[in-house]
Amino acid sequence: MALSKVNFNSMNVTPAASKAIKFNSSNNGLETGDIGGSLVLLSTQTASSSSTISFTSGIDSTYKEYLFKFINIHQATDDKYLGVQFDTGTNTNYNQTITSTTFRAYHDEADSGTALEYRTGNDQAQGTAFQKLTAGGTVGNDNDQAASGYLHIFNPSSSVFVKHFICRSNASHNGDYTTDFFAAGYFNTTTALTRVQFKMLSGNIDAGDICLYGIK
């Protein structure tokens, strides 16, 4: 079979911001189109001795997947967890029912302690508490200690299915460990989730950024 070649000089596709080049609907030419899986930054909040960080808009049926990135979350109080909860409509109780599973790996600076283990104290079985997003002990508040990671929430506007989530984070443990933490589960509701709140389970978030993205 002969190999068909395209003359580069014969292609004239006008570039467009946040667009990719793709085959047209007839598969006989090229055009610009949406980039599959691209991130759209919707909002960013920066903590400053904040008791909570809440996103009360931007989570709707526009996207089937949303991504939160929490970056250098530094807490005011030593030895505490970062947590998250969602709510529906205009409610601000942040007490949706969660079933989740968690595990962690850790390694200390002295090279004297390591583990990979399931964390029964960080999961929930139809609980309504804030879901822990950091673990392995907890995050320290030394000047150089913080936690970073991401949280995916899938199709939060569905009126049919429960709302699945996945989280991964790394934190500087207050005992000078690095802790790699995984959490996943679902919010057991078929009502659309519309808002979210992050907080330390005790004390304030001294500094750090949380960014909300929609995923095309």
Image (tube, helix red, strand yellow):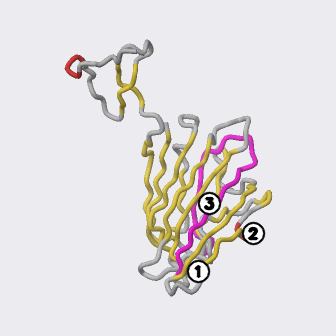
Q: Is the residue marked by circle 1 packed among few (<14), some (14-19), or many (20+) residues within 10 Å? A: some
| Between discs 3 and 2, the one toward the N terminus | 3
Residue 84 bears which disc, if any? 3
Identified at 45% across, 63% down, the residue is: 71
Q: Is the residue marked by circle 3 packed among few (<14), some (14-19), or many (20+) residues within 10 Å? A: many
Badge 2 marks a residue whose secondary structure is helix
132 in the magenta segment: no
Where does the N terminus fall, quadrant-wise? top left
Residue 79 bears which disc, if any? 1
Task: Residue lying at the far left in this picture: please name it.
Answer: 9
Identify which amino acid the numbered label 1 is placed on: Asp
Q: From this view, report whether residue 208 is shown above or below residue 17.
A: below
Badge 1 marks a residue whose secondary structure is loop
Badge 3 marks a residue whose secondary structure is strand
Tell me where residue 17 sits by quadrant.
top left
Q: Which residue is mark 2?
A: 120
Q: Which residues are magenta?
A: 177-202
Identify which amino acid the numbered label 3 is placed on: Val
Magenta-highlighted stretch: main secondary structure? strand
